[in-house]
Image: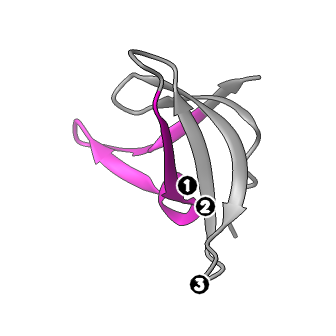
Amino acid sequence: MMEEIKIGRYRHFKGNEYCVLYIARHSETLEEMIVYKAMYDDGGVWVRPLSMWNEEVEFEGKKVRRFAYIGE
C-alpha cells in the first residue's frame, strides 16, 4: 500500500529540498502525479509520478526513500 503524500517540504536522497504543491492526475492515463517546486536556485516547478516519488532507491549501498518528508 502506498503511503499518503503530504503537502510540504521534502528532502531528496541526494540532499536538495523540494516543496510538494499539489497532487494531480494525468489527463490521459489518470495516473497520480506530484507537482513540486525546487527550493534552491531558480526554484523550477516539476512533475513526477506518485509511484516514483514514493519508491526506494539504492544510495551508497543502502535502500533509502527517494524523498523524505521534513515538514510544512
Q: Quadrant of the N terminus?
A: bottom right
Say what secondary structure mark 1 lies in.
loop
On whether residue 60 falls in the magenta region, the answer is yes
Vertical placement of residue 65 versus 18, above or below = below
Q: Which circle, 1 or 2, is nearer the viewer?
A: 2
| Mark 3 neighbour class, 10 Å CA radius: few under 14, some 14 to 19, many 20 or more | few
Vertical placement of residue 33 versus 62, above or below = below
* Residue wearing tag 3: 29
* Residue wearing tag 1: 54
- Amino acid carrying label 1: it is Asn
Q: Residue at x 46, y 31 (%)?
A: 44
Q: Which residues are magenta?
A: 44-68
Q: Residue 27 at what x, y percent from top left? A: 64, 77
Per the model, the C-alpha gap separating discs 3 and 1 is 19 Å
Vertical placement of residue 22 versus 19, above or below = below
Q: Residue pushed farthest bottom?
A: 29
